[in-house]
Image: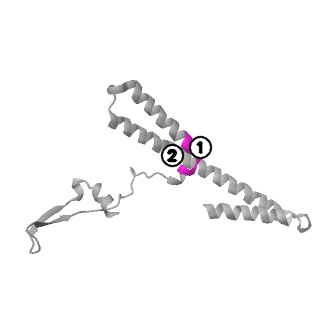
Amino acid sequence: MILAKIQKIRVQQVPGTYSHVTSLTDHRAVKLLININENQRGPNYWKLNTSLLEDENYKVIIKDLIHKYNTKLELEKLDVDLHTLWEQLIQEIRTISISYSKSLLESFKQTINEIERKIQDKKDKPANEIDMNEKKLLENELSQLYDKK
């Protein structure tokens, strides 16, 4: 794990290097100070919600988007800056992912509200009219949704 982080080090993360003579070998020992801080969350920080990768609809959308960029790259050949194209792709993935996550959350909330409303409707009925099996099924479904959350 530490090696993976070391490979991603930027110059700003290395505040100093020092070397000194060691008695164990004729080589100099090198001391490298590395400032490894995880990315600080802020207004420009975005991290992909990887649970979206389990959603087949989301994967289709992203695959189509990547195909669109591949086609664009093939058509424009050398007239395109790859770094710019990459940044545009990442920005579009970010926008789609945020929007998709919001719609999933909204759908999830609507499902919970609907089940809670049905349970409340059952509770509001007179005791002799309540279908206890259906009420228990609804409560279990609601409980599973909360566990999934």
Report the residue at 73% width, 65% height from top: 140
| Mark sitting earlier along the chain (1/2) | 1
Q: Is residue 109 above or below residue 20?
A: above
Which residue is disc 2 drawn over? 97
Q: Main secondary structure of the magenta part?
A: helix
Residue that extends furthest to the bottom in the rendered view of this protein: 23
* Residue 102 place in picture, x, y as percent: 56, 48
Do the CB atoms of the residues marked 1 and 2 lie less than 8 Å apart?
Answer: no
Residue kind at label 1, given as amino acid type: Asn
Residue 76 left/right relative to 106: left
x and y percent of residue 125 in the render?
86, 63
- Say the numbered circle drawn on residue 57: 1
Task: Say which quadrant the C terminus sits in.
Answer: bottom right
Q: Secondary structure at mark 2?
A: helix
At x 78%, y 63%, the residue is 137
State left or right for residue 38 relative to residue 62: left
Could you say which is closer to the camera, residue 72 or residue 101? 72
| Magenta stretch holds residue 141 | no
Image location of residue 92, percent across then percent down: 45, 39
Horizontal side, residue 11 vs residue 71: left or right: left
Q: Residue at 53% of width from left, 44% of height from top? A: 99
In this view, the residue farthest toward the right is 128
Residue drawn at the location 39% of the way across and 57% of the way down: 41
Dividing the picture into quadrants, the one containing residue 11 is bottom left
Camera-side mark, 1 or 2 = 1
Does dot 1 land on a helix, a strand or a loop?
helix
The magenta segment is 52-60
